[in-house]
């Protein structure tokens, strides 16, 4: 995932030329210089470890509990929280850190690593397909009772699985749209807070 480009460097040059450059202590820039020397893969791995641990914990907590439509509540929660977090941390990193190298490392830990491992939109799609396949295999065997609307086990499988597949896909789409909205909300909130 490419890092979003900003015009922050251009704005800093203009501010310096006007003489109204924001006061940022020299120690603030040198204080994080160690962070830029950490290998990118290690940043992603650390963030992914944290995101995976939280997701696994929520999935364990959700085991045996009810489902929201076709998904477990933990899948819905991690996707919506992760979308909000990603929007928030993107705006926060852009306004907080002047150096591109530091912002990139923050986004590798928080965005690619943590939010990438925490969120699981693919699981939502796979859950809908899994539910549809389960419905197909639950059709009565040949010789079993079929309703008058279906004439064969194959047509019974289609009749019973297609609505579940459509429900799952629509629920995935709704959650994706809500996730985009939460990411925009998180970005907006962090942008309004300032540094």
Image: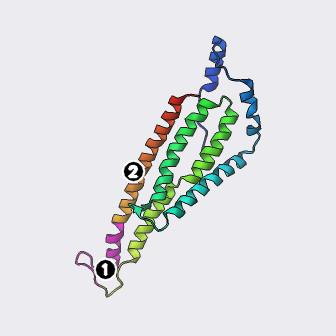
In the image, taking residue 182 as reference, residue 43 lies left or right, namely: right
Q: Which residue lies furthest to the left in this view?
A: 148
Camera sees residue 120: yes
Label whose residue precedes the other's in the sequence (2 or 1)? 1
When the figure is inspected, residue 138 is found, relative to residue 8, above or below; the finding is below
**Residue at the image position 22 percent from the left and 78 percent from the top:** 148
Q: How crowded is mark 2: few (under 14 residues within 10 Å), some or many (20 or more)?
A: few
Left or right for 185, reference 163 = right
The answer to if 158 sits in the magenta stretch is yes
For the N terminus, the quadrant is top right
Q: Is 133 colored magenta in this rendering?
A: no
Query: Residue at label 2?
Result: 174
Q: How many labels does the image show?
A: 2
Residues shaded magenta: 145-162
Q: Residue furthest top?
A: 18
Residue 5 can be seen in this image: no
Q: Which residue is drawn at 65% across and 17% down?
A: 21
User: Where residue 16 sits: x, y (%)?
Assistant: 66, 15
Label for residue 152? Answer: 1
Q: Residue at x 53, y 52 (%)?
A: 119
Discs 2, 1 touching: Cβ within 8 Å: no
Q: Is mark 1 on a helix, strand or loop?
A: loop
Counting other residues with Cα less than 10 Å from the Cα at mark 1, is it few (<14), some (14-19), or many (20 or more)?
A: some
Q: Quadrant of residue 66?
A: bottom left
Out of 13 and 54, give the one closest to the viewer: 54
Image height of 173 relative to 151, above or below: above
Pick the quarter of the image with the C terminus: top right
């Amino acid at each position: 995932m490419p890092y979003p480009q900003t015009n922050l460097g251009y704005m800093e040059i203009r501010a310096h030329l006007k003489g109204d450059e924001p006061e940022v202590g020299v120690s603030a820039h040198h204080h994080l210089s160690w962070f830029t020397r950490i290998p990118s893969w290690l940043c992603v791995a650390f963030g992914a470890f944290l995101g995976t641990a939280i997701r696994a914990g929520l999935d364990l907590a959700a085991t045996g509990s009810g489902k929201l439509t076709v998904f477990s509540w933990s899948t819905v929660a991690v996707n919506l929280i992760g979308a909000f977090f990603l929007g928030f941390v993107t705006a926060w990193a852009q306004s907080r850190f002047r150096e591109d190298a530091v912002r990139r490392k923050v986004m590798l830990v928080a965005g690619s690593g943590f939010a990438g491992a925490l969120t699981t939109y693919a699981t939502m799609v796979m859950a809908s397909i899994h539910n549809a396949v389960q419905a197909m295999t639950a059709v009565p065997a040949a010789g079993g009772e079929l309703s008058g609307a279906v004439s064969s086990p194959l047509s019974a499988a289609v009749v019973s699985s297609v609505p579940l597949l459509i429900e799952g896909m629509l629920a995935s789409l709704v959650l994706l749209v809500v996730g985009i909205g939460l990411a925009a909300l998180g970005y907006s909130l962090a942008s309004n807070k300032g540094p």
